[in-house]
Protein backbone atom coordinates (compact mmCIF):
# COMPACT_ATOMS: atom_id res chain seq x y z
CA UNK A 1 0.00 0.00 0.00
CA UNK A 2 2.86 2.37 0.84
CA UNK A 3 4.40 1.79 -2.63
CA UNK A 4 1.08 2.60 -4.29
CA UNK A 5 0.80 5.91 -2.39
CA UNK A 6 4.40 6.81 -3.25
CA UNK A 7 3.86 5.95 -6.92
CA UNK A 8 0.66 8.02 -7.01
CA UNK A 9 2.39 11.00 -5.37
CA UNK A 10 5.30 10.84 -7.85
CA UNK A 11 2.90 10.59 -10.79
CA UNK A 12 0.85 13.59 -9.60
CA UNK A 13 4.00 15.65 -9.07
CA UNK A 14 5.24 14.77 -12.56
CA UNK A 15 1.94 15.74 -14.17
CA UNK A 16 1.85 19.02 -12.23
CA UNK A 17 5.37 19.95 -13.33
CA UNK A 18 4.64 19.01 -16.95
CA UNK A 19 1.55 21.25 -16.95
CA UNK A 20 3.55 24.13 -15.51
CA UNK A 21 6.23 23.69 -18.16
CA UNK A 22 3.63 23.83 -20.93
CA UNK A 23 2.02 26.92 -19.40
CA UNK A 24 5.41 28.69 -19.38
CA UNK A 25 5.64 28.65 -23.21
CA UNK A 26 7.42 31.75 -24.58
CA UNK A 27 4.82 32.23 -27.37
CA UNK A 28 7.52 32.62 -30.01
CA UNK A 29 5.00 32.41 -32.85
CA UNK A 30 2.77 35.17 -31.47
CA UNK A 31 2.88 38.60 -33.11
CA UNK A 32 2.93 41.18 -30.34
CA UNK A 33 3.64 44.35 -32.33
CA UNK A 34 0.05 45.39 -33.09
CA UNK A 35 -0.84 46.92 -29.74
CA UNK A 36 2.13 49.20 -29.12
CA UNK A 37 1.82 52.85 -30.05
CA UNK A 38 4.87 54.48 -31.55
CA UNK A 39 6.04 57.84 -30.31
CA UNK A 40 7.78 60.52 -32.33
CA UNK A 41 11.06 59.72 -30.60
CA UNK A 42 10.91 56.06 -31.58
CA UNK A 43 10.09 57.00 -35.18
CA UNK A 44 13.22 59.16 -35.39
CA UNK A 45 15.28 56.43 -33.73
CA UNK A 46 14.30 54.08 -36.57
CA UNK A 47 15.87 56.40 -39.17
CA UNK A 48 19.40 55.71 -40.42
CA UNK A 49 21.95 58.27 -41.64
CA UNK A 50 22.71 57.96 -45.35
CA UNK A 51 24.21 59.83 -48.32
CA UNK A 52 22.41 59.82 -51.67
CA UNK A 53 24.87 58.49 -54.27
CA UNK A 54 22.53 58.22 -57.28
CA UNK A 55 18.91 58.94 -58.19
CA UNK A 56 17.48 56.94 -61.12
CA UNK A 57 13.89 58.00 -61.95
CA UNK A 58 13.71 55.57 -64.90
CA UNK A 59 14.01 52.55 -62.58
CA UNK A 60 12.60 54.16 -59.42
CA UNK A 61 15.80 53.41 -57.52
CA UNK A 62 17.92 55.36 -55.02
CA UNK A 63 21.53 54.37 -54.44
CA UNK A 64 22.44 55.14 -50.84
CA UNK A 65 25.56 54.89 -48.74
CA UNK A 66 23.70 53.94 -45.58
CA UNK A 67 24.68 53.19 -42.03
CA UNK A 68 23.51 50.05 -40.25
CA UNK A 69 19.87 49.22 -41.00
CA UNK A 70 19.04 47.51 -37.71
CA UNK A 71 15.38 46.84 -38.50
CA UNK A 72 16.32 44.58 -41.44
CA UNK A 73 19.67 43.36 -40.09
CA UNK A 74 21.96 44.95 -42.71
CA UNK A 75 25.43 46.29 -41.98
CA UNK A 76 26.59 49.64 -43.42
CA UNK A 77 26.98 49.53 -47.22
CA UNK A 78 26.29 51.31 -50.50
CA UNK A 79 23.33 49.77 -52.29
CA UNK A 80 20.41 50.62 -54.58
CA UNK A 81 16.95 50.60 -53.00
CA UNK A 82 13.51 51.00 -54.51
CA UNK A 83 11.90 54.36 -53.68
CA UNK A 84 8.41 54.31 -52.16
CA UNK A 85 7.12 56.84 -54.71
CA UNK A 86 8.17 59.27 -57.46
CA UNK A 87 7.99 62.27 -55.10
CA UNK A 88 10.79 60.76 -53.02
CA UNK A 89 12.96 60.54 -56.16
CA UNK A 90 12.31 64.22 -56.93
CA UNK A 91 13.23 65.28 -53.39
CA UNK A 92 16.53 63.38 -53.24
CA UNK A 93 19.66 65.00 -54.70
CA UNK A 94 23.00 63.26 -55.30
CA UNK A 95 25.54 63.97 -52.55
CA UNK A 96 22.84 65.04 -50.08
CA UNK A 97 22.84 63.79 -46.46
CA UNK A 98 19.53 62.23 -45.47
CA UNK A 99 17.93 60.01 -42.84
CA UNK A 100 16.08 56.98 -44.20
CA UNK A 101 13.88 54.11 -43.14
CA UNK A 102 14.29 51.00 -45.32
CA UNK A 103 11.83 48.10 -45.10
CA UNK A 104 11.13 44.98 -47.14
CA UNK A 105 7.97 45.67 -49.18
CA UNK A 106 6.67 42.92 -51.49
CA UNK A 107 10.08 41.24 -51.44
CA UNK A 108 12.05 44.39 -52.38
CA UNK A 109 14.12 46.57 -50.05
CA UNK A 110 12.30 49.90 -50.23
CA UNK A 111 13.00 53.38 -48.84
CA UNK A 112 9.70 54.09 -47.08
CA UNK A 113 10.77 57.35 -45.41
CA UNK A 114 13.36 59.94 -46.43
CA UNK A 115 14.12 63.06 -44.40
CA UNK A 116 16.65 65.68 -45.52
CA UNK A 117 19.24 66.73 -42.92
Image (cartoon, rainbow, N blue to C red):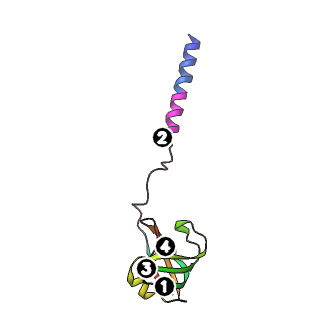
Residue ID at (55%, 16%) = 5
Classify mark 1: helix, strand or loop.
strand
- The residue identified by callout 2 is 23
Magenta run includes residue 26:
yes
Question: In front of the other: label 1 or label 2?
Answer: 1
Q: As rendered, which of 45 and 98 lies closer to the eye?
A: 98
Q: Earlier in the sequence, mark 1 or mark 2?
A: 2
- The residue identified by callout 4 is 102
> How crowded is the residue under tag 3: few (<14 C-alpha within 10 Å), some, or many (20+)?
some
Give how far across and how far down residue 67 sits, in percent. Answer: 59, 76
Give how far across and how far down residue 16 sits, in percent. Answer: 51, 31
Classify mark 3: helix, strand or loop.
loop
Question: In front of the other: label 3 or label 4?
Answer: 3
Q: As rendered, which of 68 and 56 lies closer to the eye?
A: 56
Residue reaching furthest top?
Answer: 1
Question: In front of the other: label 2 or label 4?
Answer: 4
Q: As rendered, which of 51 and 3 lies closer to the eye?
A: 51
Residue reaching furthest right?
Answer: 76
Question: In front of the other: label 3 or label 2?
Answer: 3
Residues at circles 2 and 4 in contact by the CB criterion of under 8 Å: no
CA gap, disc 1 and disc 2: 53 Å
Q: Earlier in the sequence, mark 3 or mark 2?
A: 2
Residues at circles 3 and 2 in contact by the CB criterion of under 8 Å: no
Give how far across and how far down residue 106 sits, in percent. Answer: 41, 65
Which disc is residue 60 wearing? 3
Q: Earlier in the sequence, mark 3 or mark 4?
A: 3
CA gap, disc 1 and disc 4: 16 Å
Q: Is residue 18 above or below residue 62?
A: above
> How crowded is the residue under tag 2: few (<14 C-alpha within 10 Å), some, or many (20+)?
few
- The residue identified by callout 1 is 55
Q: Is residue 81 above or below residue 27?
A: below
Amino acid sequence: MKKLLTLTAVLCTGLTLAGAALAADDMAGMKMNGGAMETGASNNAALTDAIVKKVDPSTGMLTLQAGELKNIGMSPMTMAYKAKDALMLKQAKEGEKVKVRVEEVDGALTVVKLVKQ
